[in-house]
Amino acid sequence: MRELIRANAGLLVAGVASFVLMGAGQSFYGPALPAFARAFGLSLPAAGVLISAHWVGCAIGVAITFLAGPRITPRHALAPMVLGAAGIATMAGWPATLLAAAVFGAGYGMATAVFNPRVLAAFGRQGPSMLSFLNATFAVGAILSPLVFVALGSDPRLGFGLTAVLAALVWLGSGAASRPVALTDGTTRPYRLHLPILAFGAVAIGIEACLGGLGPAALIAAGHSEVSAARHLSAFFLVFLAARMVLSFTAHRIPSFALYTFALGLTALCALGAVLVHAGAFFVAMGAPAGLFFPGFYVTASRKMGDDPRVPPTIIAAGLVGGILSPVVIGPAMAALGPLGFFWIVLGLSLAATLAALVSLRGMSR
């Protein structure tokens, strides 16, 4: 393992630095929205369009990677992250800021579709574990960035300006990671669209997105204060990070779809606990299975769909579908089901997905 790390040190360092910045940049949006609203004379919901612009850009970045294939390198992904973060920092006007958020999101999507398959291929049998480690570092940025934002005086110019500077430094140091690489061992399996695993991925990433995005509102509806909800969200991401770090040592020993199925079942149990026992405590506990979703899904989908360069962006796109659509659907529904409506929805969705995964377990494990 040490030899593999030494041989792929450039790729690993560039990937970790990029994922930390991706987590930090995404997490800056939330605390920065009130400042954008004041600066541009917008309501808070109107300022929230900035987040939508980011995810639209992410989808565009994934589409570019799908079309361009192996020609997209880490430096190609980092360049729009630099330009986008710098554009947001200028706050040159609301349309320009929305465009800059989309550019940053494009780099975010490209980086996700570039680094994951390279790390998975570079580390061979240890690939699933290193993939988990790489994605765990995203949570580091997501946890730290709100604290950094407050330390910078809650100024979006400074927060996104710092992100742009750090991304530029990563771009300068990522030359070794941007060399062309072989993503297979020489036996290339053709592109095979596998809709069932993509559907499982969309459901799981949709649940994950709702936990992070709607969780605080759900806790407030359940009786928590805004401060308490924010603290529970921070604790959720700490548990999320801990689960990913544990997985970085064990993922190569666990069948990937079995891991995915276990994560869904654990989510259902935690959601039941949130409904019957304590919403806050079991919301935090759901950080553990949420941290297992993407590695279990991505490794399974990669194995089922082949080694074609179009496979990674297809997998990421399936997750984006779930991440974008599920809050739109679940958000309005949770209010209609009472104070614990969100947790009832998560319980029903994760339980149904667990049963479907158990039925599919043998086929998915082949």
Image (cartoon, rainbow, N blue to C red):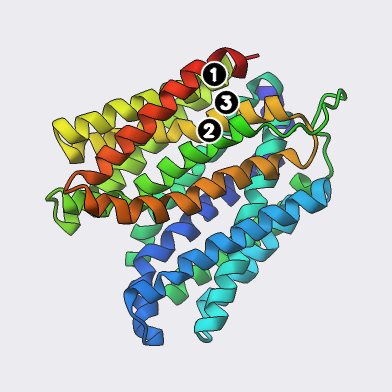
User: Label 3, on which residue?
Assistant: 129
Residue at 37%, 23% (x, y): give it: 265
Residue 170, by quadrant, is bottom right
Q: Earlier in the sequence, mark 1 or mark 3?
A: 3
User: Label 2, on which residue?
Assistant: 200
Q: Amino acid type of disc 1?
A: Ser
Q: Earlier in the sequence, mark 1 or mark 2?
A: 2
Disc ID at residue 262:
none
| Residue 281 percent across, percent down from the top left | 20, 36
Q: Nearer the viewer, mark 3 or mark 2?
A: 2
Q: Amino acid type of disc 3?
A: Ser
Looking at this view, is 326 or 273 the one in front?
A: 326
| Residue 352 percent across, percent down from the top left | 39, 28
Q: Nearer the viewer, mark 1 or mark 3?
A: 1
Q: Are marks 1 and 2 in contact (CB under 8 Å)?
A: yes
* Location of residue 328 with respect to 139 vertically, above or below: below
* Mark-to-mark CA distance, 1 and 3: 23 Å
Q: Is residue 167 shown to the viewer in this render?
A: no
Instruction: Describe the element under mark 2 as helix, strand or loop.
Output: helix
| Residue 140 percent across, percent down from the top left | 44, 46
Looking at this view, is 16 or 213 the one in front?
A: 213
* Mark-to-mark CA distance, 1 and 2: 10 Å
Furthest toward the right, the residue is: 186
Disc ID at residue 360:
1
* Location of residue 329 with respect to 180 vertically, above or below: below
Q: Earlier in the sequence, mark 3 or mark 2?
A: 3
Tell me the crowding category of disc 3: few under 14, some 14 to 19, or many 20 or more residues within 10 angstroms, Cα based: many
Residue 253, by quadrant, is top right
Q: Are marks 3 and 2 in contact (CB under 8 Å)?
A: no
Looking at this view, is 142 or 268 the one in front?
A: 268
